[in-house]
Image (cartoon, rainbow, N blue to C red):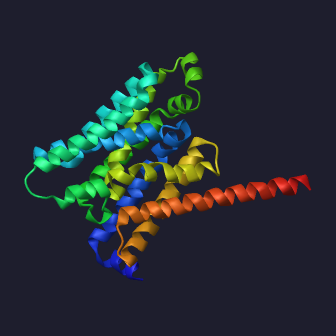
Amino acid sequence: MEFLAAFSEQTFFRYALIAGLLASVGCGVVGTYVVVRNIGYLAGGIAHAVLGGMGIAYFLGRPPLGGAIITALLAALLIGWVSLRWKQTEDSLIGALWAVGMAVGIVFISRTPGYNADLMSYLFGNILLVSRSDLILMGVLDLLILACVGLFYKQFQAVTFDEEFARLRGVHAEIYYLLLLCLVALTVVLLIRVVGLILVIALLTLPAAIARQYYGTLLRIMGLAIIVGGLQTITGLAISYEQDLPSGATIILVSGVTFFLSTIGTKFWREMTAQHRKH
């Protein structure tokens, strides 16, 4: 009841709920590709490299999210290019970007006078600090992601499931793979305000991983992932408000518990179904 009262009375709480729903759209759509293609580690490298750009932007007096977008896209293109050209050094590069990005961000933050709690919210997430301008940016990023997926759905599908076959069919697999990684980068920025850079990969992958347990086609996985992500965000937000807990961490805990329960439930159901068919 306190949660419902806060939603009806407090503007910042309505903003938080809208932000969670907007984030669920991006993570549901792009997270499906990340899970099916199995590029969670690449997404993690992109996410953690972002702190470097945010730290530099903050040091220069610029909006941190602007630095995050630029750095995320550059990291995505660099990781994708190395992944396509030098597969054997891919893990090393991602690890280096992961560490160097975080280190650069910390150094520039430390060189900036004063302490900015708002910047710390980008690292650990605080959905309750979402502003109107943040919502507009999140909405624009969602529209951009949906437009790209709508325009290049078949190409992304081909690259996700069978890259070699896509090349044989004349699809420029490398270009669409890089574009897909850029969408991952934009989704990372989309989720920063909700759960922060530290936990962003969990929210990017868990709803899609849950949806994949029930469906096999991309569109159905995306649809269910969006719904699951929205419900997890709302539930986590409600629990965090009622119990006075960190919002980002609570949302991830709800997502993790849902994933484990779903995994156990689907496995149990399949075993029961298989036994029933034997009899």
Nearer to the camera, 143 or 23? 23
Q: Is residue 3 left or right of residue 222?
A: left
User: Residue 245: x, y in percent?
Assistant: 36, 71
Q: How many marks?
A: 0
Q: Is residue 146 left or right of residue 154?
A: left
Residue at 14% in and 50% down: 110
* Residue located farthest toward the bottom when viewing the structure as drawn: 1
Query: The C terminus appears in which quarter of the rendering?
Result: bottom right
* Residue located farthest toward the left when viewing the structure as drawn: 113
Examine the rendering and report whether any part of residue 53 can be seen.
no
Examine the rendering and report whether any part of residue 262 can be seen.
yes
User: Residue 54: x, y in percent?
Assistant: 22, 45
Residue at 48% in and 57% down: 229
Query: The N terminus appears in which quarter of the rendering?
Result: bottom left
Q: Is residue 179 above or below residue 251?
A: above
User: Residue 243: x, y in percent?
Assistant: 39, 77
Q: Is residue 169 above or below residue 99?
A: above
Residue at 48% in and 45% down: 31
User: Residue 275: x, y in percent?
Assistant: 85, 56
Residue at 50% in and 32% down: 156
Nearer to the camera, 256 or 98? 98
